[in-house]
Image (spheres, grey):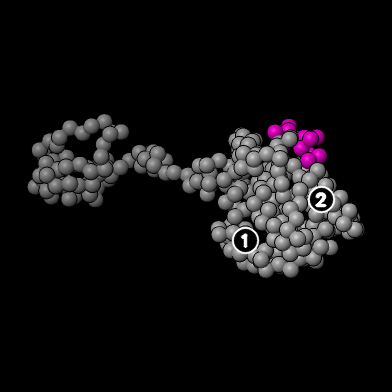
Amino acid sequence: MASSLSTIALFLPQSLYIKPRLAPRPLPPPQFRSLFLTSPAGARTATVMPRRAAVIVSAATAETPKKKGESKGFVEEMRFVAMRLHTRDQAREGEKEVKQPEEKAVTKWDPSVEGYLKFLVDSKLVYDTLEKIVQEAPHPSYAEFRNTGLERSASLAEDLEWFKEQGYTIPEPSSPGLTYAQYLKELSVKDPQAFICHFYNIYFAHSAGGRMIGKKVAEKLLNNKALEFYKWDDDLPRLLQNVRDKLNKVAEPWSREEKDHCLEETEKSFKLSGEILRLILS
């Protein structure tokens, strides 16, 4: 009889549950009850969990999925997104298909001195703009990035002077550099999260892939001369870690929406930087 009642209990609403004549073991308080109870006959029968309790359990056990790299700080999130936008020729973690000449491996490039000079001139305009924005700090957080040791404007000025001494004519900034510089000026005032995305990608890309590009171009065009653009006055890994810490600090109070907005700007950063990089092959 007890076994039959236990079976019927599976199909009855909790409010109509008829207890067997043999009193079951006293139940613990609701918050500690198991999803199962044992009938007097020893058979395990499922109980109907109140809707409210089920919602509480669901909310307590659900976990919000984390972004790639989120547990290591926001810079790691930016790094992950940036790596994904590289091609496999450019980076081991790259996922993008090769569509533009500059997206091929550097070993496959056919650069020219004239194109390289255009690249250096436009790059200097972008770094001039970045450094000026950081000094003026239209948003107070930008002041964190003054005098980081990663600045490149002065180094590029030295390199362009060296080319001039070799008899080369230094060109005026071209459309890719002018467009990017103007975009950075506008962004720095109205959209600090997007601006920080460009700041990170410009400096960190140059410290990694940029150095490899400089070395390969120097081998092909400059008799292995190392330009000042690719030299730093201090230990580069230490400088980069210092800036990573500052970036994480600046991004810490951002909402998840603001962080995602920053990450979404990565593709635009790659597009504008890629147009300048392409000048080397012009």
Q: Position of residue 224 (x, y in %)?
A: 73, 58
The residue wearing badge 1 is 90
As rendered, which of 167 and 94 lies closer to the eye? 167
Check the picture and name the quadrant holding the C terminus. Answer: bottom right
* Residue at image location 57% in from the left, 45% down from the top: 76
Q: Residues within 10 Å of mark 1 (few under 14, many from 20)?
A: some
Residue at 69% x, 61% y is 216
> How much space separates mark 2 and mark 1, taking CA atoms?
26 Å
**123 over 216 or under it: above or below:** above
**On screen, 12 above or below 219?**
above
Q: Nearer the viewer, residue 202 or 39?
A: 202
**Which of the two discs, 2 and 1, sits closer to the camera?**
2
Q: Are marks 2 and 1 in contact (CB under 8 Å)?
A: no
Q: Which residues are magenta?
A: 131-144
Amino acid beneath label 2: Asp
> Does residue 257 appear in the picture of this structure?
no
Horizontal side, residue 160 vs residue 108: left or right? right
| Residue visible at 14% across and 47% down in the picture | 43
Pick out the residue farthest to the front: 223
Q: Disc count in the image?
A: 2
Asked if 237 appears above or below 215 in the picture, the reply is above
Instruction: Read off the residue under disc 2.
Output: 159
* Mark 2: few/some/many CA within 10 Å (<14, 14-19, 20+): some
Mark 1 residue element: loop
x%, y% of residue 234? 68, 39
2 or 1: tag closer to the N-terminus:
1
Question: Tag 1: residue type?
Answer: Gln
Give the SS element for disc 2: helix
Q: Looking at the picture, how far across and down is residue 9, in whole percent?
A: 20, 47
